[in-house]
Amino acid sequence: MKGFLEYVPGESFLHTMNPVAKLVAAFLLVIACFTTSNFILLAVVIALDAVMAVQCKMVQQTIGLAKAVAAFSVVLALIALLFTPQGDVLAPLPWGYIGTASVLNAAFIVVRLVACAVPLFLVFYVTKLTDMANALVKVLHVPYKHAFTFMSTVHFIPVFMNDMAGIMEAQTARGVEFDGGLVKKVRLMIPLCVPLLVSSVRKTNSAAIAAEVRGFNLRTSASGYKEYPFAALDVAALAGSVVLVAAAVALGVLL
């Protein structure tokens, strides 16, 4: 997934929202997804995800992310399918059975993870990490060290992925063929973890030295000059997210 978690400039409503409002609204959507057991509410969240992706002109990235999350969640779904027998028996197993409710739970895991992953990732695609860190410090009064640590973690994910892609391209130029099954790819990629680790340590060390030179330990909430006021759009997004959480809780109590 080229450009994974890298900022994509634009003029959509998500781009113009307050960084804190975007992050809080995304987390509220995650809470709503994990609180509810209703497919209709999850379908509403997925529809919102699709609208945001189209409005941000990031349909391709969103589809790629949804595929990756779905592939990962299939493993969890299979575990739930095979080891949580519920409902009417569909297929007997030596240690239990696969039931009708087991199939629904497995499908629910996939849908839930896809629905809650897209808003979080979209927030990082449409928000500069510097604005995110500064807004957390300015608005929520998060200690700058904590905000910097979180944003640095997100920042280095695409950096390490690009480094790994460069190492693989260099090995391909030397005649290494990465085409084939998953087992072959993993076997060929394991030795590449050593140069990736060395490169990562060098980059993190350089980043730490640069931060100290720029007075990292002296940074406070008053150090940033940029302000992050809340607009009507931010309040509306937060209110809509709260309504979804309330609906998820209410449906859970009623059902």
Image: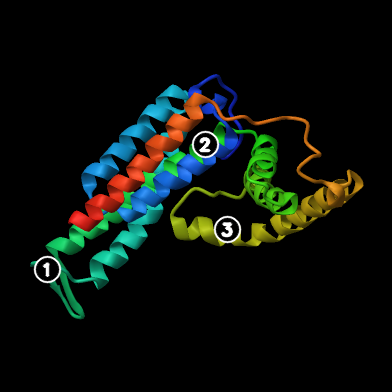
Q: Amino acid at mark 3?
A: Leu
Q: Which residue is mark 2?
A: 22
Report if the CB atoms under discs 1 and 2 are less than 8 Å apart: no
Find residue 123 and report its horizontal and vertical position in percent.
53, 37
Q: Amino acid at mark 2?
A: Lys
Mark 1 or 2, which is nearer the eye?
2
Image spot of residue 89 (x, y percent): 9, 69
Identified at 81% across, 48% down, the residue is 207
Whether residues under marks 3 and 1 lie with C-beta atoms below 8 angstroms apart, the answer is no
- In the image, what residue type sits under mark 1? Ala
Q: Earlier in the sequence, mark 1 or mark 2?
A: 2
Q: Position of residue 54 (x, y in %)?
A: 41, 24
In the picture, residue 10 is in which quadrant?
Answer: top right
Quadrant of res 138: top right
Q: CA distance from mark 1 to mark 2?
A: 45 Å
The quarter holding residue 18 reads top right
Which residue position holds label 1?
91
Residue occupying image coordinates x 59% and y 57%: 189
N-terminal-most mark, 3 or 2: 2
Other residues around mark 2 within 10 Å, as few (<14) / some (14–19) / many (≥20) = many
Q: For the point 29% across and 49% down, which residue is it?
A: 248
Q: Looking at the image, do the residues carrying marks 3 and 2 touch, with CB atoms under 8 Å apart?
A: no
Q: Which residue is mark 3?
A: 188
Residue at mark 3 to residue at mark 1: CA–CA distance: 38 Å
Count numbered badges in the picture.
Answer: 3
Q: Can the viewer see residue 51?
A: yes
